[in-house]
Image (spheres, helix red, strand yellow):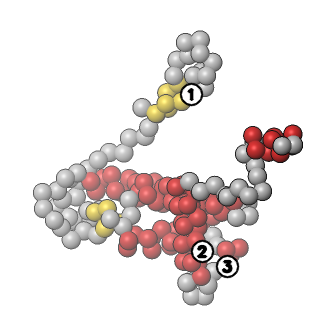
C-alpha cells in the first residue's frame, strides 16, 4: 500500500466512501428548509426566495399554528392561567413556542448555508425575535407557568484546563 493511500485511509477519505448519514438536526433542517420553500412557491403569486422577507416568515409561522398540538387557552377561557385544567375546552391548538424557536434557528442556519447573507437573513430579523417573545409570554400566561430565563453559570476550575471554559445551564 502506498504511503499516500495509507494516509487517506487513516484520515477517513476514500474514493468509494459513502457520504455520512446526516444527523437528526441536519435532516430536520433540510426538511424545514424544503417546507418553507414549498410554502413560498404555494403563495399567490409565488415568492422567489430572493424576495422573501420577515413578513413572509411571520406568515409562515402563523400558518404552522393550524398543525400545532399545544392547547393555548384564550383570555376568556375559564382555564386561562391554569397549568393543568380539570376538563376539556374549545381553545385552539397551536405550535409550542419552543418548537417555533427551534424551527427559526434551523431555518436561519439553512438560509445562510444555501447562499444567503447574514445581513439579508429574514429569519434573523428583529421582528421574528419580537414575535417569538410574544408567543412565549402569551403561552406561559395562558398555562399559568412563568417563563424563567436560563442563567449561565461558570464552572469553577480546579486546576483542570479542560473544564475552565465549560459553561453549564442551571
Q: Which of the numbered marks, if any, corresponds to residue 48?
A: 3
Q: Looking at the rendering, in which quadrant would you find the N terminus? A: top right
Q: Which residue is mark 1?
A: 166
Picture coordinates of residue 83, whole percent (x, y): 22, 51
Q: Nearer the viewer, mark 3 or mark 2?
A: 2
Q: Residue furthest left?
A: 86
Residue 135: x and y in percent read: 41, 58
Left/right placement of residue 49 relative to residue 140 reads right
Q: How many C-alpha atoms fall within 10 Å of the one at disc 3: few (<14), some, or many (≥20)?
A: few
Which residue shows up at 32% across the image and 45% down it? 146
Q: Report which quarter residue 112 is drawn in.
A: bottom right
Crowding at mark 1 (Cα within 10 Å: few <14, some 14-19, many 20+): few
The answer to which of 139 and 94 lies nearer the viewer is 94
- At x 42%, y 32%, the residue is 170
- Residue at the image position 33 percent from the left and 52 percent from the top: 140
Identify the element where label 2 is drawn.
Answer: helix
Residue 153 position, x and y percent, is: 49, 27
Work out whether residue 39 or residue 55 is closer to the camera in this orientation and state it: 39
Q: CA distance from mark 1 to mark 2?
A: 37 Å
Residue 37 location, quadrant: bottom right
Q: Earlier in the sequence, mark 3 or mark 2?
A: 2
Residue 111, placed above or below residue 167: below
| CA gap, disc 3 and disc 2 | 9 Å
**Residue 126 shows in this picture:** no
User: Can you name the residue that lies furthest to the bottom here?
Assistant: 45
Image point (48%, 68%), residue name:
61
The label on residue 36 is: none
The answer to whether any part of residue 43 appears in the image is yes
Amino acid at each position: 500500500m502506498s504511503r499516500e493511500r495509507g494516509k487517506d485511509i487513516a484520515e477517513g477519505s476514500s474514493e468509494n466512501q459513502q457520504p455520512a448519514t446526516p444527523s437528526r438536526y441536519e435532516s430536520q433542517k433540510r426538511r424545514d428548509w424544503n417546507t418553507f420553500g414549498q410554502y413560498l412557491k404555494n403563495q399567490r403569486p409565488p415568492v422567489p426566495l430572493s424576495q422573501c422577507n420577515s413578513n413572509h416568515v411571520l406568515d409562515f409561522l402563523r400558518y404552522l399554528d393550524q398543525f400545532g398540538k399545544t392547547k393555548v387557552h384564550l383570555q376568556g377561557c375559564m382555564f386561562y392561567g391554569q397549568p393543568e385544567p380539570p376538563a376539556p375546552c374549545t381553545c385552539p391548538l397551536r405550535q409550542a413556542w419552543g418548537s417555533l424557536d427551534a424551527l427559526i434557528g434551523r431555518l436561519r442556519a439553512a438560509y445562510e448555508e444555501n447562499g444567503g447573507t447574514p445581513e439579508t437573513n429574514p429569519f434573523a430579523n428583529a421582528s421574528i425575535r419580537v414575535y417569538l417573545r410574544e408567543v412565549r409570554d402569551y403561552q406561559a400566561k395562558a398555562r399559568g407557568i412563568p417563563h424563567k430565563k436560563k442563567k449561565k453559570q461558570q464552572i469553577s476550575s480546579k486546576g483542570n484546563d479542560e473544564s475552565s471554559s465549560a459553561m453549564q445551564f442551571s
